Image (spheres, helix red, strand yellow):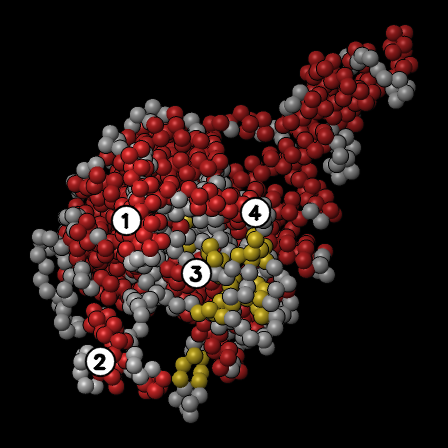
Amino acid sequence: MAAIMATSVPLSHASATPVATASGLLAMLKETDPILRSYALTNLLKVVDTLWHEVAESLPDLEEIAEDLDLDLPTRQTAAAVASRVFFHLEEPVQALRLALEGGEENFDVVNDRKSAYVECLVAAAIEAYIKKKRALADGVVGDGDEEKKKMDDDDDEEEEGLDAEKLQKVVHLMFERCYADSEYGHALGVAFEARETDKVREILDQCASSHADNATLVQETLRYALDASMTLVTSKSFRSDALGIVAGHLQKMFDAPTGTAAHRSAAVLLCRCHQLLAQAKPVSDIVSSLLDGSEDDALLGLQLCFDLVDSGDQNYVNAVADKLPKKVASSSLGGVESVPTSSENGVDQNTTASSRTDEVWVRFDNALRVLTGGFTSELALSFLYKNSDSDRLIMENLKKSLEERGSGRNSVLHNNAVASHSYLNAGTTNDSFLRDHLDWMKKASNWAKFSATASMGVIHAGHTTEAMTLLEPYLPPSSDSEGGEAPAVTSAGGYAEGGSLFALGLIHGSRAGSSTATRLEASNFIRNHLRNSHANEVISHGAALGVGLTAFGSGDLEIVNELKELLYTDSAVAGEAAGMALGMVLVGSGAGNTKSSVPPGDAEELLEIMAELKNYARETQHEKIIRGIAMGIALVNYGQEENADAVIEEMRADRDPILRYGAQYALALAYCGTGSNKAIRILLHTAVSDVSDDVRMAAVISLAFVLYKTPERVPQLVKLLLESFNPHVRYASCMAVGIAMAGTGDPESVSLLEPMLTDMTDFVRQGALLGTAMIYMQQPDLCNSKKIKSFRERLSSIIGDKHQSTLTKMGAIMSTGIIDAGGRNCSIALGSRNGFTKMTSAVGLVLWLQHWHWFPMMHMLSLALTPTYAIGLNKDFKYPKNFEIQCNSKPSAFAYPKRLEEKKEEKKKRVETVTLSTTAKNKARLARKRAKEEKEGGVAAMDVEKVEDIEKSKEDDEGGDSMEVDGAEGSDNAVPAKSEEKKKKKREPEPILFRIQNPSRVTNAQSDVCAFDLDQRYRPIRPEAKPFGVIMLTDSTPGEEEDLGAVKAPSLDAEDEAEAPEPFEWTPPGHPDADASSTPAGDKSEKPNEADGSNDAEAPNETSS
């Protein structure tokens, strides 16, 4: 007892004197007296943070005391608090949290003790455990795809099972209250989104709106965060839809506030994004209509939203929005107008609104429809690519020369690739002059190469819908003479140019999402007519099927689906493959055949049957090409479906046929495209290292790039080890994945990652490395990556000309030559739009382009993925002010076009200066003396000698001009110092650190991050907070002043640069009596009467020759 009292003396002054050891206090824990135990525990709690290593040995005793129900509650809570602190220092937060929850609020104060590391750590552990429990409840039974994760999380789950759910929830709710008090609504929303608690999301947003009713900016920023978080953090589609519905409700209240305010316009932008994510067309059309009916600035914002809708690449959704906009139609009364009746808009009767609309307002609606369905966006891109093309013709000249020099011109594979590379270089620019100038070279293509060469015209003229039929008329198959009549009978032989032209027609109309709906429908009907009548010829059927798929992209038309199904059942391998892919393009993103889908209820059952038939047919047919076509078609149908597609994907993954498993990887890529889903990544990585088929493993690795394209820096980290795989298919796929994810970034680390693959022992791995590096280097200047891009370009040309390289490696180099400078150096591969949406056309185009591994004509599908990168400011009349400029806060060289190639000039051989012999010198001296003597005599002979010498000198000039420079040493000595002085004067000026971009101009994705709007100029963007990229609607601060405007005009097939025809005139032959009168004007006759004949004689031959 004395010992105990001895130890208790210093403990009473613990705050003043630090305790060196806790052994005495720990000994007191074994006492039976509850007062002593309580005393020891209270003092241990004070010193546990410094003496926890000693207390750790008594953890069993502490836990025993905490669980002893015979003891009073404060003692048990203190023992739990001490044990919790020890576990915290032992870095076991879950155990520490379990005991802290038992320790009571006095020992674990979440609200007031927020700066403590102990509290912050346990709060983080509490939130993590809370999220896991809530997710487990939301998910219910763990799916098959989560088995790997379930095994990994078993240990954690066992630990978390001991946590009191009620107390855990109380801690988290206290954290929510703390966030409300600090106005940190973003933190609270993050937890609610992770836990998938819809009620909590509603509570947080309601709390924000009610507490800050007078601060619209804070409320809007919170709603913006909620919208962005739902796009990036939330992996469950069903929960995302619920959360977005709540966000949309709050945004609608802000939008219904008084118009004309900044908050009203910002709410309109966010609300449109919200409804677009929910795939709701009617609310978006109501918002656009409301803005178009408003002030001029509101109308400009409405048109800006229309451009943003088209930029997302979902033409079917855009058409739905356009259909619900009010239309102006002629009235039967005296020249009046009326609108097509639609449902009420924000509580206002449409008929009342329509009657009050003026002609000026109806022009706004016409412009909106022109953007959405009239093809203006496509026309804008086409005009820009045509006028601003920086395509270097010498690249193709050198490529053609290299292939012919090495005898590779006879290789049809390389010739076919060269034609495809030319189409990449000039994609969308309408510049096909190289092909027209080298028709003999083009004619080398035969059979399927001829099909592919003809189809390449569609890539070059992508978006040129107005002239499509005129361009392809020489190649198109014959049609019926009378309307509605049947086309002439098709033979089974040939048809390569005809099939290629139908494919080209589809590429022209389908490569740009904003192409005209009317012309696209017209082209679709034209191709469908040939599709129905060409079953006898598999080549024409193949081209027609792909053309129909492109022109009816995303339409979901059942008639077209049935026509393609008929072609599929002809059991033709080539035509069947195209039919399967075309079915996927027509039904892209619909989720047909799934439990949940976006298919109209009336068509759901029929499409369910069709999808079931396709799966059965894939298992019955013997043609691998048909199986691949159906597998890729199913993958396209499940675009963006996320967990709704899990059942179909799991069924395909479990199939014995490797081709169906191959399709399952791309189905997973498209279903979870851009979501960053951990579940999808886990499945793909597992397949990449475990499947027995090389093709399946290859598809799995490439698919990683699609799932993670919004966080591209993760892809190189993921595939770093796969690049060292023993399997060449995995190495090839890793190169392609890095290239797709990092396209257009010029990232040095990614390039260095692929550099060793350029010298890989397998030829197709080298091909993949070349393609991947070319995609990374797209739109990069010559200074990129310490000028390594220049050496890469030289490497490409050397590989093409090297006779020792294999065909597959050369194929990669040729395609890379076109990809690196695609679209006249004004296009890049972009899977996302500027508003954060995944571009449907780009994702589908890339997946189909990757099928060129199996079928070369699919190379042209890259046209769908190539996105023009430009900034163009437009006024309300869709004309671009030339005075509008954007400031780029970077050096001009950082985003300059690469330097064009220079044609090598043949060096002329210089004449060596001849040595003058002594006899020659004596002879010259004798002639000089003789000439001097004759000059004295003043005879004519001196003049003759000078003339002879002049003639001799002129001969020397003609034979070798360089030798004259040596002879004229005095002149050259005088000239050299003058040039050197000029060089000294022209000092190299330092490069400016910023510059201004004209309207319109190329602006790359990376460049847009360093660009800013100058709000002090006359023309200002309607959305100054947005990135200066794409189409920008401009307001005019001084509308009364004169404007310098340019018009958007699509290129015409008629030559624009030809000289005008001369005015009519009469020509009289020389010697004719009327020659003087006809050749000399009346005014000249009086002044120069004697010059008429001479002038006639001189000019007559020129006129005859012209």
First in sequence: mark 3 vs mark 1:
3
Q: Classify mark 3: residues with Cα within 10 Å, few (<14), some (14-19) or many (20+).
A: many
CA gap, disc 4 and disc 3 = 53 Å
Q: Give yes or no for contact between labels 4 and 1 (Cβ–Cβ under 8 Å).
A: no
834 displayed left or right of 190: left
Residue 563 in picture, x, y percent from top left: 21, 58
Q: Give yes or no for contact between labels 4 and 2 (Cβ–Cβ under 8 Å).
A: no
First in sequence: mark 4 vs mark 3:
3
Give the mark toward the camera: 4 or 3: 4
Identify the image quadrant of the N terminus: top right
Residue 164 in picture, x, y percent from top left: 64, 33
First in sequence: mark 2 vs mark 3:
3
Q: Which mark is residue 1067?
A: 2
Q: Residue at x 32, y 37 (%)?
A: 921
Q: Classify mark 2: residues with Cα within 10 Å, few (<14), some (14-19) or many (20+).
A: few
813 displayed left or right of 971: left
Q: Give yes or no for contact between labels 3 and 1 (Cβ–Cβ under 8 Å).
A: no
The front one of 109 and 339 is 339
Q: Which mark is residue 972?
A: none
Total labels: the figure holds: 4
Dot 4: element: helix
Dot 1: element: helix
As shown in the figure, which amino acid type bears the numbered disc 3? Val
180 displayed left or right of 275: right
First in sequence: mark 1 vs mark 2:
1
